[in-house]
Amino acid sequence: MDIVHMQTLIAVVEESSFTAAAARLGIAKSVCSRRITDLETDLGAQLVNRSTRSVVPTDLGRDYYHSCLDILARIDAANEAAKCSSATVSGRLRLSLPIAYTEAVLAPKLQDFACAHEEVELVLQLSDKRVDLISEGFDAAVRIGQLDDSGLFARKIGVAQLMCCAAPAYIERHGMPRSFEALSDHECLRYNNLTSGSEWVAQKDGQEVRKRITGRFASNSGAYNRRLTIAGFGISVQPDFLIGDAFETGELVPVLSDYQFPAADINIVYPQKRNMPASLRALIDHLKEG
């Protein structure tokens, strides 16, 4: 038995007729009759008495009719509750976020979102590792740079412009490089998560230039590389959100400013577009607007 058979019994009892019940359900009279017969066979009990004039429920059939009404009412209530819940900005959101970008940019935005939606619980995992959203149970992730062809949906929320920089003290000791080739004579701080690996890539006069860089330090933390750069340990390529106001304060100076380093899109990615929780939709809109 299933919901369709229950609905058919309810219609037959209330209409006292297979013909009227079939018209109400939009099915053929033969289909209506067969559903009741199948239901009785499945239960091993007679639910209705049939005559040429009407269909009347047996005592068992009337009891079963009331039980079906209760079951279907509960199903309708559960469905309505689920719809209301999905339309309400509430519940838990589990997010995977890059460390440096979160600390520099996302933190105040997430705080504003939390203040505006007090019924949303934010569970954040800060890591530069690219997680598998579905298998690891994340609702969304923020990713910087080229997206994998993973079948995830994406919404662009920003752009990170890469820039080459160094501390004034480093330039005083080692001089200012004037070309990519000159980087061979300098300590370059490598960022392990760079998609181009140990190569720095830029444009000059409309042409792409590449340089494999070397240095004593390599890390997977942009924030740590920034700290090393300010401390004078070498030249680094940093996203503008990490450089912040360091050019204005004099902690850092631009290097190779006649080269155009690439920009990287910042996206929030999520596994499903249909039936998206209202809380996730609200968060995506909030990050986009911010």
Image (cartoon, rainbow, N blue to C red):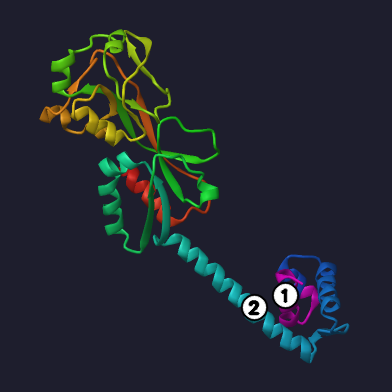
**Residue found at x 18% / y 14%:** 174
User: Which structural element holds mark 1?
Assistant: helix
Distance from Cα at disc 2 to Cα at disc 1: 9 Å
* Residue 273 visible here: no
Q: Is residue 127 shown above or below 185?
A: below
* Magenta region, main secondary structure: helix
* Labelled pair 2, 1 in contact (Cβ < 8 Å): yes
- Magenta range is 1-20
Say which residue appears at 27% left-offset and 19% top-offset. 187
* Residue 3 counted in the magenta span: yes
In percent of width and height, residue 104 lies at 26, 41
Q: Nearer the viewer, mark 2 or mark 1?
A: 2
Dot 1 amino acid type: Met
58 displayed left or right of 97: right
Label ID, residue 6: 1
Q: Residue lying farthest front?
A: 216
- Residue at 33% in and 42% down: 99
Q: Residue at x 31, y 23 (%)?
A: 216
Quickly name the residue at label 2: 71
The furthest residue to the right:
52
Q: How many marks?
A: 2
Pick whichever, 175 or 122, lies toward us: 175
Residue 20 lies, with reference to residue 166, above or below; the image says below
The quadrant in which residue 166 appears is: top left
Q: Quadrant of the C terminus?
A: top left
Residue 24's x, y, as percent?
71, 71
